[in-house]
Image (cartoon, rainbow, N blue to C red):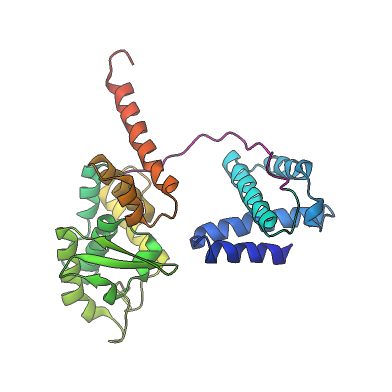
Amino acid sequence: MADHIADYCRYLTEEKHAQKNTLNSYARDLNQFQTWLMANGITDLKKVKKETVNEYLQYMSGKGKSPATVTRSTASIRSFYNYMLREGRVKTNPAKAVTSQKVERKYPEILTNREVELFLEQPKCVDEKGFRDHAMLELLYATGIRVSELIGLNVEDVNLTVGFIRCTTHGKERIIPLYTAAVKALREYMEKIRPRIIADENQQALFVNMSGERMSRQGFWKIIKYYQEKAEINKDITPHTLRHSFAVHLLENGADLRSIQEMLGHADISSTQIYTHVIQKQLKDVYNKAHPRA
């Protein structure tokens, strides 16, 4: 089964252009399922029935796994078997008719316009770290790019003259415009600060740590948490929060879904449509709080 899982993960990477975190999630779910199957004496994928999958899901629930985790595992197994069906390796999908547990839909945390302003104001441009952090946060909110894309940017990916960045993920390139404040912050960082802190003049990374090496995901996560505390914003701000806020604020101001999909780099527009639900929920919350008869 391990070979089949490896083939499936390769398919997700090469044909579906799955992000690393998504890929890791599928692989983890399927490896856990495989471990349980083997512990129960099942080594042949063709012998897995609907009852087998249900028994595994009941086992997960019994181990204290949340409904969301069980539902995600169900989806992973179902998707894996759909792939196996297309490849002709099995004749049926045992997870097809399995009913997922009902999970309360969680919407992404969104910052208000004022909270974004407050957050972006936190890095003080009085030293090298302040200039760098200010440029990173402005760029993240200006473009809505993923953290992996932010730390993966090279100097050559930025065009300050025209005002855009070029972002390439899984071989697919997209051009994302920059607003004036982001261009200004980037120019100050790239022209005055970055040359002072890079460890090697051949360093291509746009954003580097204070040792002059490419910024890491963990390093940027710490930066986000540091400024959240400074801003005293009572929300759980993650690097993805600015991406979500970018999308919702564009929608609120009249941008169309297709354009936002393109800028975010979503392969499927259904991933972008979640933000319309966020806005609807916000409106409902406002109504319930403000209407005298609500």
Residue occupying the point 48% across, 61% down: 19
Quarter of the image with the C terminus is top left
Q: In this view, does 198 lie above or below 37?
A: below
Of all residues shown, which one is farthest toward the top?
293
Q: Is residue 102 magenta?
A: yes
Whether 266 is among the magenta residues is no
Check the image and report above or below for 52 versus 215.
Answer: above
Instruction: Kindly report the secondary structure that dominates the magenta region of the rendered protein.
Output: loop
Q: Which residue is drawn at 33% across and 43% down?
A: 110
Residue that lies at the very extreme toward the bottom in this rendered image? 201
Which is nearer the eye, 233 or 266? 266
Residue 160 horizontal/vertical position (percent): 18, 69
Which region shows up in magenta? 93-111
In the figure, residue 114 lies in which quadrant?
top left
Q: Say left or right for 109 vs 181.
A: right
| Nearer to the camera, 48 or 65 | 48
Residue beneath the point at 22% across and 43% down = 113
Left-right relation of 88 to 242: right
Determine whether, in the image, residue 4 is placed left or right of residue 72. Answer: right
- Residue at 16% over, 67% down: 162
Q: Residue furthest right?
A: 41
**Residue 161 percent across, percent down from the top left:** 15, 70
Q: Where is residue 39 in the image (x, y as percent from the top left)?
A: 81, 55
Q: Is residue 238 visible?
A: no
Q: Where does the image place residue 225, in percent across and percent down from the top left? A: 35, 55
